[in-house]
Image: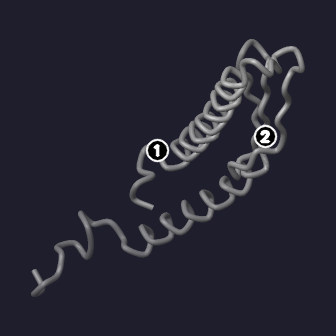
Amino acid sequence: MAKGGFPGGGFGGMNMNNLMKQAQKMQKQMAEKQEELAERTLEMTSGGGAVKVTINGKREIQELKINPDVVDPDDVEMLEDLIISAMNEALRQVEEMYNNEMGRLTGGMGGMF
């Protein structure tokens, strides 16, 4: 065995060029997938549809709709809670969408790239 080298010319005989090409291909696919996901929109509701939030894949709120029937000046806290709930669920769903799609590309090795 050469001093400081690996037997077989690589990691268990694996060709470093092939490994680098695979990593670059995966990075390109991940970048393309991120662009695709950024264009998607998701819609979340709370309070049985009283509040609706539309969010894009860039985690930007695109639209907020409030059913006028839930606007009670004596109970602003309830409306605030409904808005927070819908927005948090929208953010959670975007994160889940990213995790699912990226997990498919990386086969569970997302942390490596």
Secondary element type, mark 1: loop
Callout 1 amino acid = Gly
The answer to whether marks 1 and 2 mark residues whose Cβ atoms lie closer than 8 Å is no
Report the residue at 75% width, 35% height from top.
42
Whether residue 18 sits left or right of residue 78 in the image: it is: left
**Can you say which quadrant of the picture contains the C terminus?**
bottom left
Report the residue at 76% width, 45% height from top.
61
Q: Residue furthest front?
A: 74
The circle on residue 17 is none
Q: CA distance from mark 1 to mark 2?
A: 25 Å
Q: Residue furthest right?
A: 68
Secondary element type, mark 2: strand
Whether residue 25 sits left or right of residue 34 in the image: it is: left
Whether residue 47 sits left or right of residue 13 in the image: it is: right
Residue bearing mark 1: 107
**Which of 23 and 15 lies nearest the eye of the viewer?**
23
Residue 70 pos. (x, y %): 81, 16
For residue 98, which quarter of the picture? Answer: top right
The circle on residue 41 is 2
